[in-house]
Structures are given as C-alpha cells and as structure tokens.
Image (cartoon, coloured by chain):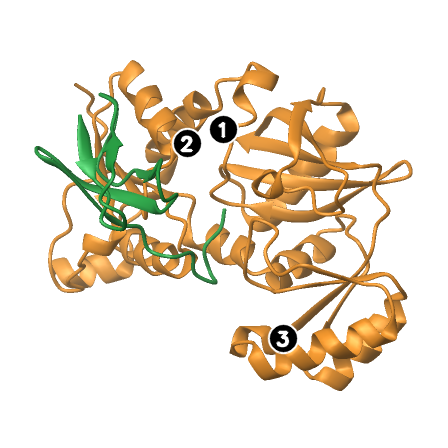
Chain colours: A green, B orange
Amino acid sequence: MTAPCPECDAQVPLDAQTVIGEVVPCPDCSADLEVIALQPPALVLAPPEEEDWGE
Amino acid sequence: MSEVRVAMLVSRVRVEEKLILGAFARRGHDVEVVDVRALMVDTHGQLPGWDVVLDRCVQQSHALAALRLFEDRGVATVNTPRVVANCADKVVTTSLLVAAGVAVPRTIVAFSVDGALAAIESVGYPAVVKPPVGSWGRLLARVNDRDAAEALLDHKATLGSVAHQVFYVQEHVAKPGRDIRAFVAGGEVICAIDRLSDHWITNTARGATTVNRPVTAAIADVTLRAAAAVGGGVLAVDLLEDGERLLVSEVNHTMEFRNSVDVTGVDIAGRIAAHTVDSVRNAGAQQPAVLAAVSA
C-alpha cells in the first residue's frame, strides 16, 4: 500500500500495521507525514512540534 | 471482549502507542483510540461510556484539559490531571520533590533577567537553564560564563514566549556520560536504563543510546519517593549520578520507551496496560460533585 506525499508527490510505502494517526517519513523529501485515512490511504503534513509537546 | 472500557487519548500514534494497543489486545481489552484534536467535550453532556482514559498525548496543554474534564465526570485517568500538572512544569516538579525530601540538583527559580543572572552566578558556572515546560532536551542551555548567560537571557527575554519569563536555573551536575531513567508502573520500579551520550544532554531524542541498568535498592528508593511526590502512576524518573548520590532531574508522565524494551527485557507496554485496567478498580465509586450536579 502506498500514498502520495503531499510535499513532493513521491509514493510513500505503508505497511499492513499502519494505523490512522501514525507519523511516517517520506523516503524522498523526509517530510513528516500523518496518516489520516487507510481506505484509500492518505497523508498530510504532520503538525510541527510545539512548545508544550513532550513526554 | 473486556468489561473494562478503555480509551487511549493521543495526539499522534507513535511506536509506543502501537505497543500499548498490542498489549491491551493480548489482554483481551478493546481500546478506543481518541485523537485529542477531534475531541469535543460538552460540559453539560454525556461522555462516551469509558471506564478509563489512558493519556498518551504529546501536547500537554491538551492532555491536561481533557483529563480534567474526564476525571471530574467520573472517568478514571492514567495519569491523573494532578500528576500531569505536577510533571509537565519543572518548577512544580522540583518544588514537590524538594518538599518531599527527594534530592535534586540545586535549583533557583527567577522571574526577571536580572534575577536569572543572579541565580546563574549563585549556582556557578557552568549552570543549566531549562524552560519550565518542554521535553526531549529542547532549549536546554549549559551556560559556561557570564557572557553566555547575558546573551542567553537577552534572547529568552526578547524572543521567548511568556513561558520563558520564568527562569529555571540549575547547577550543572558532571554526570559520568550517562543518566538513569527508571520506569514506574503500579507503585513498582519495573526496570531502568542508562542513557549514554558524549553530549551533556542525554535524551534519546537527541541521540543517546540505551543499556539496561539493574534496579538497585538505592535507585528503587529514590525513584519511588519521586513518583510518590508527584502523585504516582505510570512514570519515568530521570536520575543523575553525582558521585554516590542520585539526584532526580525530572519526572515524565507520558514517557517514551521504544528504546528501553529490548535492552531491559521488560514488557513496559504490558505493564502500562495492566496498571490502566487496575486503576479502574482503584478509582472506586467516587462520585465527583460536578457529575452529581449534571445528573440532578
């Protein structure tokens, strides 16, 4: 399964364990991409890290 | 499946969240994954019928507000909003640790550039300046001399948000190329790791590597006292070795652990899942006043 990168239009591979909400890197442009749908798979640019993000 | 209705609150689904979902599944528990960005809580309405919400948000402001709303409406939370508030702000964490008699690096909190400069001079060079809120080693500064201190503080005052106008100044601890992270779940230290780095910042997010660290009595003691000081739950306590002393540098309430499972051999995700289910029992039949008012 693949989905197009919204940044560079490369086909980003997604394995069978991929879930909605997961962040995957684009192998071509290295953008962080968030999986927003699986059927069919779709990706958007992941939100940038904010000040209060953490563990 | 399970009688316990579990929701997991997320901002994004990382390796840790997938491991936790797998751990719940192996225990026969269905989990509803709730993206906090899609969450909407009508304060006069009904919540979905969750028994417990496990917080795995990376955005602490979102987590804190959502957990408060859940807890006030009778839903058990892991961790509780009180624990999140206690851990999310280093000023609060350190204050609680010191009040509980837990050893920490000498820390001074200042509220102006002049105050921060005096604080840095007081702890001596090198000093460490941290943002009260933040993680993953971001925006930590080791200040080696007065010139650097003045430049850093000027930048923070000019460019920083209001959160950077509270200055958290700490003595620098010359740790031996590592710190210790000890994991707590259910009132027990379940494992620990060393985080190794040539850099003075030893976060794995900044490239530190990990090895297993046997949990000694001393590590267990300081870790459990630190965990109790912030309210307990599922936590990662970071320790600095200062000679023979163990100092607590911070306590993390939604810890990452992907680099700790293989080296420790401990099913951390499984322990989180087990504690989450147990917390429903521990929450008991307390009926918060706000829920009673809604029901009336």
The residue type indicated by label 2 comes to Glu
In the picture, the quarter occupied by the N terminus of chain B is top left
Horizontal placement of B292 versus B134: left or right?
left
Chain under callout 2 = B
Quick one: B207 or A30, which is closer to the camera? Answer: A30
Residue sitting at x 17%, y 25%: A1
Query: Which residue carries the number 1 mark?
Result: B258
Quick one: B185 or A8, which is closer to the camera? Answer: A8
Query: Which residue carries the number 3 mark?
Result: B166
Q: Secondary structure at mark 1?
A: loop
- Whichever of labels 3 and 2 marks the residue nearer the N terminus, that label is 2
- Of the numbered discs in the image, which one, if any, rests on residue B16? 2
Up the image or down, B211 lies above or below A38; here it is: above
The residue type indicated by label 1 comes to Arg
Residue B64, image quadrant: bottom left
Up the image or down, B191 lies above or below B135; here it is: above
Up the image or down, B181 lies above or below B134; here it is: above
Residue B63, image quadrant: bottom left
The answer for how far apart the CA atoms under marks 3 and 2 are is: 32 Å
The answer for how far apart the CA atoms under marks 1 and 2 are is: 6 Å
Task: Tell me, yes or no, whether dots 1 and 3 are on the same chain.
Answer: yes
